[in-house]
Amino acid sequence: MRKTARAWIISRDYGYLEILVQSEGIEIPRARLLRRINQGEFAVLTTFNAGELLKNPHVYLDLYLDKNQTYTYRLEALDASGRSLGFSADLSLDAQGLCPGR
C-alpha cells in the first residue's frame, strides 16, 4: 500500500531589521529590542548582549507579522545593572514595509 504525506507551506510576512549601534564612547553592555503593535504598549522582543551589539549591523527577523497591523520598534540601551541609558528613535513598519513570506 502506498501512502502519501502532505504538508502545507504557509507564507507569512516578516520584518527585517538591521540594527546599527553607535555608542559614541558610552559602554552599552546590553540592549533590549521593543515592539509596539498599532497604538498598544511596547513589549520586549529580545535582549542583546555586548557581543551581539558589536556585530554591526546586527540583523533581527520579526516573524509572522500581520499586514493589517502597524509595528513600531525601538532599542533601549541598558547599563550593566539593567538600568535604562536611553532609547533610539522609533521605526514604524506598515504593510508596505514588510518583507513578503517565502
Image (tube, rainbow, N blue to C red):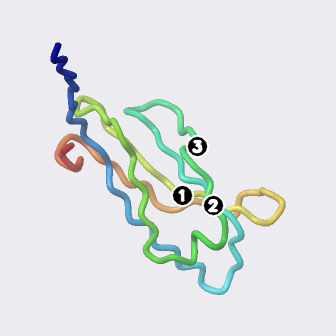
In the picture, the quarter occupied by the N terminus is top left
Residue occupying the point 43% across, 57% down: 60
At label 2, the amino acid type is Ala
Image-based side of 18 in relation to 24, left or right? left
2 and 1 marks in contact (CB < 8 Å): yes
Please count the marks in the image. Answer: 3
Give the distance between the C-alpha atoms of the residues marked 2 and 1, in whole angstroms: 7 Å
Give the distance between the C-alpha atoms of the residues marked 3 and 1, in whole angstroms: 10 Å
Residue under label 2, please give it: 31
Residue 21, x across and y down, in percent = 52, 74
* Circle 3: element type: strand
Mark identifier at residue 75: 1
Residue 55, x across and y down, in percent = 51, 76
Residue occupying the point 54% across, 53% down: 33
Residue 27, x across and y down, in percent = 71, 78
Residue 69, x across and y down, in percent = 29, 32
| Chain-order first, disc 2 or disc 1 | 2
Mark identifier at residue 63: none
| Chain-order first, disc 3 or disc 1 | 3
Residue under label 3, please give it: 44
